[in-house]
Amino acid sequence: MIRLEGISKEYFMGDVEIRALDDIHLGVQRGEFLSIMGPSGSGKSTLLNVLGVLDQPSSGAYYLEDVDITRLRDKELAQIRNRHFGFIFQSYNLFPELSALENVMVPLMYAGKPRAERLKRAEELLNNVGMGHRLRHLPTQLSGGEQQRVAIARALANNPTLILADEPTGNLATDQGAEIMGILQKLNEQGTTIVIVTHDPGISTYGKRLVKLRDGAIVEDQAIAEIKKEA
Ligand SMILES: Nc1ncnc2c1ncn2[C@@H]1O[C@H](COP(=O)(O)OP(=O)(O)OP(=O)(O)O)[C@@H](O)[C@H]1O
Ligand SMILES: [Mg+2]
């Protein structure tokens, strides 16, 4: 589905060059559940943002279904993002003035769905993540785990082929985190491809494959089943 070839990303702070990603070669197949780990500053978020086309690499090629998309224009990239990807962040990133239901309706509006269909679909999505009883609540009236479930429902609104999650359990208590990972695991079993970034080794084992980064480079790439066998 996705192939990164020789992807690098540099930032310049005055004269100083920061190499956030250094010659990354990475393939993501349909149906995978990939966890990315590594120390703070190792390039995890940068890699996830490049994968999700939120950020452009400085060099290298990004193939999505065999098309190199690094040459496309912003408008085309935005279309790819809306059509293919769903994003989940550590801080939920819900619209604070909108209810749970309205938050999930936003991407459906951008996709041009009529209001009746938006309402029906948003309610269905919230039911699926166990939030059907909190449709009218504002984000501030929800717990962290509940807000993240709304964020997942919103990420799923346009049936993405790939879910990208940056520390989705980073702000949650262990049991709430396990619940969120259970939802992602179920989505993966139903066919959605998932890539998550996490600091937590326990969380990483919900995936099927683990990639470790250090100083912007991949230093390990292994199936979780293999890691468990070795342990
Ligand atoms: N906009 C930016 N300008 C300059 N440097 C940046 C920028 N964004 C990231 N960096 C640097 O790039 C490196 C990788 O950052 P990144 O956010 O990808 O790390 P991370 O692995 O996600 O860390 P954390 O676990 O703390 O979230 C870091 O050294 C960071 O300081
Ligand atoms: Mg990060």
Image (spheres, helix red, strand yellow):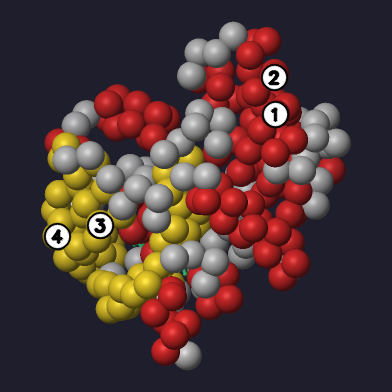
Query: Assess mark 4: CB under 8 A from ligand 1?
Result: no
Percent position of residue 156, x then y:
55, 36
Label 3 or label 2, whichever comes before in sequence order = 3
**Tag 1 near tag 3, CB within 8 Å:** no
The label shown at residue 120 is 2
The type of residue carrying mark 1 is Glu
Of tags 4 and 1, the one toward the viewer is: 1
At x 19% / y 32%, what residue is drawn? Answer: 72
Circle 4 SS class: strand
How far apart marks 2 and 4 lie (CA) works out to: 44 Å
Front residue of 8 and 122: 122
Front residue of 127 and 141: 127
How far apart marks 4 and 1 lie (CA) works out to: 41 Å
**Tag 2 near tag 1, CB within 8 Å:** yes
Q: Which quarter of the image is occupied by the N terminus?
A: top left
Query: Assess mark 3: CB under 8 A from ligand 1?
Result: no
Percent position of residue 39, x then y:
43, 78
Provide the residue designation for mark 1: 124
How far apart marks 2 and 1 lie (CA) works out to: 6 Å
Provide the residue designation for mark 3: 27
Q: Would residue 115 be visible to someone looking at this image?
A: yes
**Mark 3 residue crowding within 10 angstroms, few (<14) / some (14–19) / many (20+):** few
How far apart marks 1 and 3 lie (CA) works out to: 33 Å
At x 84% / y 43%, what residue is drawn? Answer: 141
Q: Would residue 17 be visible to someone looking at this image?
A: no
At x 61% / y 43%, what residue is drawn? Answer: 152
The type of residue carrying mark 4 is Gly
